Amino acid sequence: MQNEALKKRSEIPEEYTWDLRDIFPSDQAWTQEYEALKAVPAQFEAFQGRLGKSAQTLLDFFKLEDEISVRLTKLVGYANCKSDQDTGDGFYQDLRGKAMSTCVSVSSATAFATPEIMEIPQADLDRFYQELPALEEYRRSLYQIRRRAEHILSPAEEKLLAAAGEMSEAPDNVSSIFRNADLKFPDVTDGKGERRPLTDPGFVPLLESPDRVLRKNTFETYYATLGQFRNTSAALLDAQFKQLRFFAQARKYDSTLSASLDRTEVPTQVYTNLIEAVHSNLDKMYRYVALRKKLLGVEELHMYDVYTPIVPDAAEKIPFEQAKETVLDALAVLGEDYTALLREGFEHRWIDVYSNEGKVSGAYSSGSSRPHPYVLLNQKDTLDSMFTLAHEMGHALHSWHSCKYQPVNTADYVIFVAEVASTCNEVLLMRHLLNKTTDKKERAYLINHFLDQFKGTVYRQTMFAEFELELGRMAERGETLTAEVLNQKYLELNKLYFGPDMVSDDQIALEWARIPHFYYDYYVFQYATGFSAAVAIANRILELGEPAVQDYKKFLSGGGSTDPISLLKLAGVDMSSPEPVNSALKLFGELIDELDALC
């Protein structure tokens, strides 16, 4: 199926493309809906100044908001998928732009709603619930709007903060343009003396090479180049945390961390618990580093040795049809209803499978389940591709359950839980593959794959999270984030997390300058918590069976009906406690012991 040369979109067999006719039967139907939605802003504006007048008016507003939300989701979903399948098709790029402008128009027309809802006296709102029980469906939405009352300012102040919002994005925007457009690297030389091109996206792939000369030259050249701009990079990161401090103080939060986490109702102790739990399990990371040093057979393990495989490639080619069957077998523990949904997606073209000219890279689940989710892949017939299939279908079925069992206004789940279902599928697939094989080489290869997930997702992202937390605290103390300060702090953390068997090369102190996530406002910790929660849920399912499966499906069906910590408790996992992280890293330690024994 896969040739090295990319096929044109028209050359991909239809059964390996998604069927977007389930959203709109034709481009013409999409255009008709686009035109119809132009009348929506006026419909919303008719409610302005009236939301607190009566229960019926408030209910009518929410009902209209639900209806338009579903229609916009379909409009945007169709346009996005069409444009992503071939970014060179200008017609669908135009549709995408029109869809976005429609969303902006509707958003602008409903801007009055939040301040009006905030101003409704609690006594009036209590009376509304009694007068019109149907309004109870929106109690969660009303709570979400009103719970942050102490952080909402006067209309004039809110207008000023909104106007400053665009400027606040400048550090991220400038940093992104610098890294992706302006930053250029010289070629590097491999062990044979041949020159190889070095780019930012190609940095890690070169560090995966078995050629140690190439890895060392790549590492040193990359950071020597980045180091020439260290003061610019530091100034951008300093500006990022200054704007976070400004908005946190303006909204009367005690820290930038609490301001960020409050948006998704995650207690700050979840963040700090993660760091403390990982600190208490650093001995396992040190054992992993020692094992990597041993298996690579090097006298000194350097930071440019972190990505290269330590177990020889034992992966066979895994065609897509085989990958689907393996994923179905692995996820059979989740019940016939779950695997029936998987088959529905596989057989009714929810998935765009193979690469073609102009198709976006990577993989994603559309997030929308109206009428059902769509998944984009770039299938390579490898073990990684099979895990990607399991991962993205985990996202898809999470969205499907949330949309089916929740009303529109609570169907969306927050980012804190977004990676749990996808990663749970991956863990179940890994455990299934390990249970099936007795071949030492294959088992070692699989365990190494799993260990790298732990290392990259729990330890590395927690190190990032700890670095980010310290930067926020420094900014709150009025300190300037200079390149020297950032280098010193990052190098200290790198030494702490990798331990005594790793040579923390001086250049690694600059790694902070290549990580875009430091502009994402306390985002990265959720990779580590999500992975830990997923491991805990998967273990619970494999140990307890059906009761744990039913608990997990309550979580999948919960959408945004309550806060994310409470949602995960439905699945039997308490992320307000360090226990899930400790449990996941206990498994990490056991896998290190097994890999050491196998090799």
Image (cartoon, helix red, strand yellow):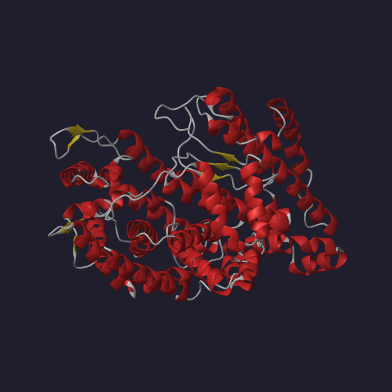
Image quarter of residue 209: top left
Q: Is residue 217 left or right of residue 363?
A: left
- Residue 115 appears in the rendering: no
Placement of 247 over or under 175, stated as above or below: below
Total marks in image = 0
Placement of 262 over or under 520, stated as above or below: below
Location of the C terminus by quadrant is: bottom left
Q: Residue furthest right?
A: 131
Depth check: give the residue in front, 424 or 556. Answer: 424
Q: Is residue 36 left or right of residue 377?
A: right
- Please give the name of the residue rendered at 72% of the width and 31% of the height, measured from the top-left corner: 25
Q: Is residue 97 left or right of residue 308?
A: right
- Residue 364 appears in the rendering: yes
Q: Is residue 334 left or right of residue 467?
A: right
Depth check: give the residue in front, 397 or 106. Answer: 397
- Please give the name of the residue rendered at 41% of the width and 43% of the height, measured from the top-left corner: 317
How far across and how far down the image is residue 514, in percent? 31, 47
Q: Residue furthest front?
A: 438
Depth check: give the residue in front, 313 or 451. Answer: 313
How far across and how far down the image is residue 141, in percent? 69, 59
Depth check: give the residue in front, 270 or 162. Answer: 270
How far across and how far down the image is residue 353, in percent? 53, 38
Placement of 292 over or under 188, stated as above or below: below
How far across and how far down the image is residue 397, in percent? 62, 53
